[in-house]
Amino acid sequence: MKKKVALITGITGQDGSYLTELLLSKSYEVHGIKRRSSLFNTDRIDHLYQDPHDENKSLILHYGDLSDSTNLIRIIQQVQPDEIYNLGAMSHVKVSFDTPEYTANADGIGTLRILEAIRILGLVKKTKVYQASTSELYGLVQAVPQSETTPFYPRSPYAVAKLYAYWITVNYREAYGMYACNGILFNHESPLRGETFVTRKITRGVAKIALQLQDKLYLGNLDAQRDWGHAKDYVEAMYLILQQEEPEDFVIATGITTSVREFVRLAFLEAGITVGFKGSGANETGYVVSCENPSYQLPAGKEVISVDPQYYRPTEVELLIGDPTKCQQKLKWQPKYDLKGLVKEMVASDIELFQKEKLLQESGYMIKNQFE
Ligand code: NDP
Ligand code: GDR
């Protein structure tokens, strides 16, 4: 039987890595678009490497960029994909305030370029498209829990660009009969999460503080609430969205929301450290109440969290909580991880990582990265 062929933009990102693993396990031929970078940028998929000289290889990478339509047309023409997963994006909400034009180009027009390429190449009836939409579309709270019918009110250049991508996907579906769907995914995390997103920043901070590689962690808005799931579960939903009889948009979420402050508390607890908070707003601090793990010598009262307003956003999204009813009923999607399991895996992974780094630093084989 002929293998199904998938093309993934953003294959080097968190979701790209888990989705590639999933599709390879289902015997797909997977093509990915990676950007040229002055450093290697394939860390997250290196474990999936296949020799490019092997005639039976099922993972093939192409250089490309969502800002370059001729490149996208050429790759899609060559690959003739059955499914395209458009995961590529400038995905950091805070950074999008600094790079709004680039974000609009990659995240908004980039989606149009993919859809147009399919149309130009006459692949409308062959190629299905998954668009990585986001709970950031809901922005300023209109109603909770947020479902497929909740009105959007984006609060960042990132979310506005993704709003364009959402509607252009709907439009190509309605105008040309394309199988094109939005997965409106709420936050999903993992040990592969980018280091500057809050969950990973926290679990790295916990590991470094516990191992005495760092004194304290600076964060922004501790009151923000997010519906956090595990990326491994969420890529299953992406796949399911493209296997339905009819193309539709789906919210993917757990239905449970948690504050950043509570995530901090749970992450320290995983390392055997009980943390309390005092003060409020920019003066709030987190301190060690007790340290039950004898490997980490943290005295009670030690300040480990401070608020730094540089991490505040000009316009914030305060509360996200998704309604997973439709995806549970139609996709039969159920996450395998809960928040505790997610935090446990992330903290364990970062402690292991920094135990190794500590050894390398102490032996003089590695210098500390000062730019974190
Ligand atoms: P990451 O930031 O980990 O990965 C983004 C990927 O996009 C990377 O491979 C990156 O390449 C690539 N990329 C960035 N800019 C371009 C460009 N101009 N052209 C081509 N590729 C580009 O994101 P995630 O894996 O977490 O998220 C995947 C997608 O899902 C994104 O679109 C994100 O906006 C969206 N999303 C994510 C959610 C989450 O909670 N994780 C929730 C909802 C939506 P490089 O490695 O070279 O930087
Ligand atoms: P988000 O994720 O903006 O929801 O976008 P992020 O982890 O960056 O922020 C979540 C919340 O935590 C607050 N926060 C901090 N955030 C960061 N990054 N750093 C901090 O120090 C900090 N302190 C507090 C933020 O203000 C925010 O309220 C993610 C991305 O993956 C998007 O691409 C995706 O679309 C959405 O999730 C769903």
Image (spheres, rainbow, N blue to C red):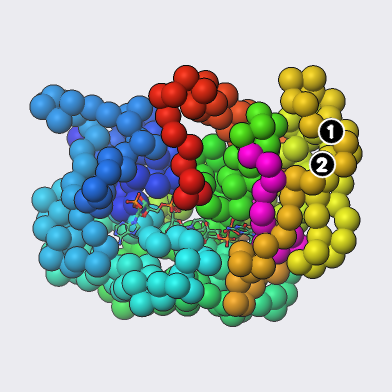
Camera-side residue of 108 and 44: 44
Residue pictured at 33% horizontal, 46% vertical: 11
Asked if 227 appears above or below 27 in the picture, the reply is below
- The residue identified by callout 1 is 299
- Circle number at residue 199: none
Determine which residue is flagged by label 2: 302
The reply, left or right, for residue 41 in relation to residue 156 is: left
Which residue occupies the foreground of this view, 318 or 181?
A: 318
Cβ of mark 1 under 8 Å from ligand 2: the answer is: no
Q: Nearer the viewer, residue 218 or 54?
A: 218
Residue 215 falls inside the magenta stretch: yes
Is residue 174 in view from this perspective? no
Residue 315 percent location from the top left of the image: 61, 77
**How crowded is the residue under tag 2: few (<14 C-alpha within 10 Å), some, or many (20+)?**
some
Q: Residue at x 68, y 41 (%)?
A: 215
The amino acid marked with disc number 1 is Pro
When asked about the image quadrant of residue 351, the answer is top right
Q: Quadrant of the N terminus?
A: top left
Left or right, residue 348 beside residue 28: right
Left/right placement of residue 358 relative to residue 33 reads right
